[in-house]
Amino acid sequence: MSKTLLDKVWEAHTVRTLPNGATQLLIGTHLIHEVTSPQAFGMLRDLGLKVLYPHRTFATVDHIVPTDERVEPFSDDLADAMIKALRQNCAENGITFFDLPTGKQGIVHIVGPEQGITQPGTTIACGDSHTSTHGAFGAIAFGIGTSQVRDVLATQTMALHKPKVRRVEVNGKLAPGVYAKDVILHIIRKLGVNGGLGYAYEFAGSTFDAFTQEERMTVCNMSIEGGARVGYVNPDNTTFEYLKGRPFAPKGADWDAAVARWKATASDADAKYDDVVTYNAADIAPTVTWGINPGQAIFIHEKVPFASEVPEKDRATAEEALAHMHLKSGAPIKGTKVDVAFLGSCTNGRLSDLQEVARHIKGRKVREGVKAIVVPGSQGVASVAESMGLAEIFRNAGFEWRGAGCSMCLGMNPDKLVGDQLCASSSNRNFKGRQGSPTGRTVLMSPLMVAAAAVTGEISDAREVFGVK
Amino acid sequence: MALEKITQVAGRGVYVPGEDLDTDRIIPARFMKCITFDGLGEFAFYDARSFAKADGQVHPLDDERFQGASILLSGSNFGCGSSREHAPQALYRFGIRAIVAESFAEIFFGNSITLGMPCVIASSEDIRAIAALIESDPAAVLTLDLTEKKISIADTDFPVTIAAHAHEALVSGKWDAIADLLEGLDAVKSRANVLPYMAA
């Protein structure tokens, strides 16, 4: 005993040790999308190799799909070539493709869990750094580059080195109006954007225990923003309940056997960690970023820092961030004018995110001059939200209700910031140029904070705007 | 598939200062609408270079003095953010063959090694000292010696470090893992057979 979930999953998936000391690790589930896979299929063809386990490879299209006009051919020739390439690669290799007409398309990190493909105790890889999302189910999930996509297609394995494990413990109950997004932004602020280098983060403690499966996904999703390639939560009844009955989840007697196995993959009570950090949920307030990386974050009632206040190492980046964001040191972040409000992404584009916002936005109006869009994370999320009347609530409030995709999280589709627009965004990265305009400005926050910004036209405390108590 | 044993990289240097230079900075996402990596080189640091130009300045990658440089120097947490291999591919295709920084983000590091592009760590002071030497003599050749784990310029040696596995992979010509992985296919199938979720 005394093993972490990572130890157990690593052991169960180790094929052998390679000559250079790396582990050849079996990757049980491979998720692919249109951006990072075409070159990998090209390499496969050049090497005369085949996809080894087509039935363990699943594809969808998300980064480049338009969220408004979705009729093919897309007006963007490059985007059109990418979806066609993926369609052909999947057809030629017998890979399941959750394509646009299937009604199951969406952001890869939303589709996997939704279909029940993401399961505890498994290994998952995808050519996308937010693959850490799947760790919410007690899977060990890696974001990988295209050469590794090739490796997984051809061998269902990768050469990897086992990371250390840091237990990130948060205990207690979050105050009303404080969300999973605030928790992970707070953790990154405290541990730094490269604090997780070489580590897997095990998110534990009573706060995560009480979280829904979707809240856990929001947290694990942003592990990589803290430098940790892998993040996970130990699987429990919340996980099993979420998975039960989903299309790819085990059925009947297989289900019971699977749950027994899954339970056994959780970290042992006496597991040894390389590091442990602990936070109190009660200390966390709604959090927003002020800079150009997700670690540059403050509570909504705090003031934009002076570069001189940050550690010397981070000072140059802070100065660059303040200049890029046009924010004034010493001034409150609250009240900063907002041009765009974006609700969506693999971080916060799930049904519970939309439900929570809809509950508060009902009867309110987006401020004139603010462009507000809601982009459901998948066609599945969209269709349930529509049947529940959420789409109508958003439309009545003045939001545009869009089709599923990555949308404005990154500038690979028509949804982009223009010029130096400032976007209140429920996404995961505030890097310079991330939202498609080199001078565009991103302020990361929880979905309800995005809604508050949409309603007031400025960065606001959602608890005040919506009377959350 | 015999690969070149990478023990040494020699070439002129270029210093791109900054901490946490992320993959969106190295290659903005809008340039990833492609189905091959060809032609990505010209988009390396595209926005940063455009900004510099608009401000009447010259980005180091566009500075005439550093044209043809093949060793890039930068700050800490280089390549953080996305897993896009497009980032090291863009740098490689721009002509970069080795990177020296204070630290590297994990996925970027792995992607670079797989391309046979060493990423080595040096101290902040040494990187600045090397940058100053490059600035005073842009034609000076930097030599990264992976066997000796040092980088030399103008008769001065600076120590560098690199993760042992990456070092071994580069100097033994096994930086692209695919050949090793393929050799283990029988073991892969045996392992897969004992995992219930791998069943067809």
Image (spheres, coloured by chain):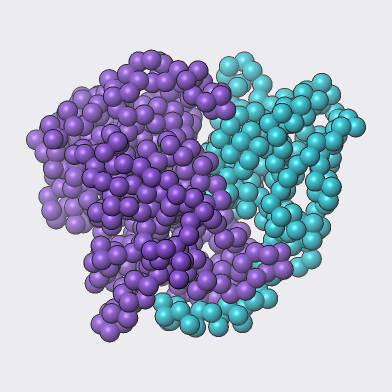
Chain colours: A purple, B cyan
Percent position of residue A8, x then y: 47, 69
| Outermost residue to the right | B155
Percent position of residue A300, x then y: 29, 27
Left or right relative to A65: residue A342: left
> A59 and A261: which one is in front?
A261
Can residue B95 be seen in this snapshot?
no
For image coordinates 70% across by 34% down, the residue present is: B123
Percent position of residue A410, x then y: 43, 41
Please identify the quarter of the rendering in which residue A271 is found.
Answer: bottom left
> B105 and A350: which one is in front?
B105
Can residue A253 be seen in this snapshot?
yes
Percent position of residue A330, x then y: 38, 15
Q: Is residue B10 above or below residue B50?
A: below
Q: Quadrant of the C terminus of chain B?
A: bottom left
Q: Is residue B138 above or below residue A306?
A: below
Left or right relative to A292: residue A235: left
| Outermost residue to the front | A270
Q: Quadrant of the N terminus of chain B?
A: bottom right
> A49 and A316: which one is in front?
A316
> A19 and B54: which one is in front?
A19
For image coordinates 62% across by 53% down, the residue present is: B110
Please identify the quarter of the rendering in which residue A364 is found.
Answer: top left
Q: Is residue A125 above or below residue A319?
A: below
Please identify the quarter of the rendering in which residue A212 is found.
Answer: bottom left
For image coordinates 34% across by 71% down, the residue present is: A263
Q: Is residue B84 above or below residue A437?
A: below
For image coordinates 69% across by 27% down, the residue present is: B60
| Outermost residue to the left | A363
